[in-house]
Image (cartoon, rainbow, N blue to C red):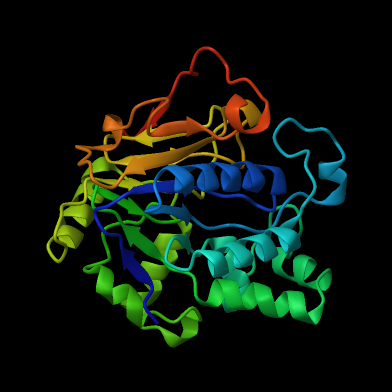
Amino acid sequence: MRRHLVLPARGRALVSTDLHGNLADFEALAARFEALVSEEPHTHWILAGDLVHGPDDTTAASHHPLYGYPDDSARLVREVSELVARYPDRVHVLLGNHDHGHVGGPHTAKFHADEVAALEARLGSGERAALSALFARARLAVALPCGALVCHGSPDDTLERLEDLDTIDLDPARNDAYQRRVLATLLGSYGQPEARTARLLTKLSRTLPFPLTFVVHGHDKDERGIFWEGKNQVCPVLFGAFREERRCLVLDLERAYADAHDLRDGLEIVRVHHASLDGEAPPSEPPPMARRFT
């Protein structure tokens, strides 16, 4: 199966990261996507993995500022599946490490000792089948002509070509050592030294009609809603950020971004919960931005 995707140099791309069963965040993003599509029909939405596995009931009821929300993983999977059916060439789901456990990968632990078992125990047979179908056809990486490589984690420089992703089996036991390493770092790496990511981007660019200049990834969290690792990695955060700080990206596919620092607050870097979409006024000043591996 084709596990990588190269987008055309036309339109825009909404990029969002880990939802972890947060239906309110998904609905705000879906409203933004529909608004973008009404302005520019050639708009894509890349959901960069970890759709499922939200807080347990005790945490959800705690009013915790980061994790006090109900786990709507089952409904979120249904809503995303319906959106993919409506926009099969526009909505792209990437596999996250939490999603992976439902299609042959290792089982994760966060709010439950076994997140996969905890979620599937709450699902009917039809819901389990829908969840497996969505994640079985998920991508591992998307290359954007504006220079972005979108993945769940921030991978190391093992991968030689994007086409190599198409031969990877989601069951790690069926892969060779190279494939196992590539899959593990795509789904599980939190960030890389700038030089290592630069080597990866240079290698992958050799077989593309455009240069890749930075990685957009999820898998990590920051209360302030976004952080950079050097100039070539950026993580817009949903899960693990305060509600008013949660960020997504809206990238112009016809623009060439020199690096991740070329993204502008309020233009490419956008707050998810915005007054024009859900009635919440954004803060007047952006928060300080963390930069790691500088």
Q: Residue at x 26, y 74 (%)?
A: 163
**Residue placed most toward the observer, 291 or 270:** 270
Q: Residue at x 61, y 67 (%)?
A: 81
On the rendered structure, is 3 left or right of 196?
right
| Residue 284, picture quadrant | top right
Residue 13 percent across, percent down from the top left: 39, 48
Res 153 seen here: no
Is residue 94 placed above or below 131 in the rendered structure? above
Among all residues in the image, which is located at the extreme front? Answer: 38
Res 60 seen here: yes
Among all residues in the image, which is located at the extreme top? Answer: 284
Total number of numbered discs in the rendering: 0
Is residue 8 placed above or below 61 in the rendered structure? below
**Residue placed most toward the observer, 68 or 147:** 147
Q: Residue at x 14, y 66 (%)?
A: 207
**Residue placed most toward the observer, 5 or 237:** 5
Is residue 285 placed above or below 214 in the rendered structure? above
